[in-house]
Amino acid sequence: MAEIRVENLRKEFSGFTAVEDSTFTVEDGEFFVMLGPSGCGKTTTLRMIAGLELPTSGRILLGGEDVTMKRARERDIAFVFQLFALYPHMNVRRNIGFPLLAQGVARSEIRARVEEVAKLLRIDHILDRPVSGLAGGDRQRVALGRAIVRRPMCFLMDEPLGTLDAEFRDLMVHELRELHNRIGATTVYVTHDQMEAMSMADKIAVMNHGIIEQFGSPREIYERPRTMYVADFMGSPPMNFLRLHSGLQKGDASIRMGEADITVPQLREDVAPSDLMLGVRPEHVRLDNASRLRGEVLGAEYLGTTQIVVVETGEGTVKARIPASITVNAGETVGLALNASHLSLFDKASGRAIETALYEGGAHG
């Protein structure tokens, strides 16, 4: 397997910029996910890595070799598509072995490698069945097998679970990550599903309008988003945003919000009051009748062990993830406490995160 390095990659289509100045490195053996909504540039980036699209500018290096202007057939990669792209007139065995047959590999070796891959994917019992009668999960395994059997330098996957139902998708998320761990493959995976990304990725690149908004581990991106877009895109429900009406200066560790003094991570830069938003995840909000940050309960969504309570405050709507055992009623007034060690501050105009020193203590309103 091999490292993939992308440098200042750009792609234009008739004056429209689909990807702008993307730079990142996928380490050897890493499971790397490109995440974002439709039209954000993630699939275009994947297709340029594969050689299915040539970039307008920038470089792509595969295993240290510059492959920027090489076609797909000249790159040692395997591509797994969303719609499987299987040959319906062939059985499972012939579908998996077809790339090796096209390369002129001896039939005895093809048979051995196909059976090895089928066993790895747990489809060795259906090798002689036609693909047309297979369930979606098995068809996806066949598509993966056809990619794996070539033993390429890296695997590129374009929303391969997008057509599966929820049960198969959850199963395949687990199996794809397990498969990655077993074969040590360098993998670039494209999805719009944040749960897929969080479950499988070693590193995630969150894209928006052709730009990588943030690059890092799932934990880093979720807990310390660098932009309001990332904070809003990641999480279900997403991060809450509250308006702040008083300014903060470098070194400040608390701020006035309505009648409450809110402990915040210590600032490392000065910010005007009109430019500041406070962000907090629902799981870092709790009900506290002693808090001066108060609001009216609009409703609650029962989720089994937890519930999402929606509270309207003077600074914005807050969703709190609290234990289902707590009783709350629509229309009642409650106090809210925010966990200061998990707060984020953002510049409202640019959407960027304000530089702070992480506060590790407790918090209250």
Image (cartoon, rainbow, N blue to C red):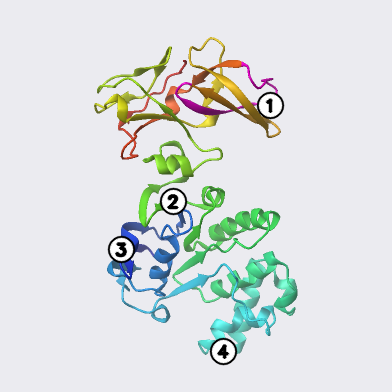
Q: Are marks 4 and 3 in contact (CB under 8 Å)?
A: no
Coordinates of residue 218 in the picture (x, y in percent): 47, 45
Residue 317 falls inside the magenta stretch: yes
Q: Secondary structure at mark 4?
A: loop
CA–CA distance in space, label 1 to label 3: 48 Å
- Residue identified by numbered label 1: 324
Query: Which comes before the other along the chain, label 1 or label 3?
Result: 3
Tell me the number on the disc at residue 9: 3
Query: Which comes before the other along the chain, label 2 or label 3?
Result: 3
Instruction: Identify the magenta region.
Output: 314-332
For this orientation, the residue located farthest to the top is 290
1 vs 4, front mark: 1
CA–CA distance in space, label 1 to label 4: 62 Å
Query: Which comes before the other along the chain, label 4 or label 3?
Result: 3
Instruction: Name the amino acid type tagged 3.
Output: Leu
Q: Are marks 1 and 3 in contact (CB under 8 Å)?
A: no
Residue 40 falls inside the magenta stretch: no
Tell me the number on the disc at residue 203: 2
2 vs 3, front mark: 3
CA–CA distance in space, label 1 to label 2: 33 Å
1 vs 2, front mark: 1
Instruction: Name the amino acid type tagged 4.
Output: Ala
Coordinates of residue 230 in the picture (x, y in percent): 42, 43
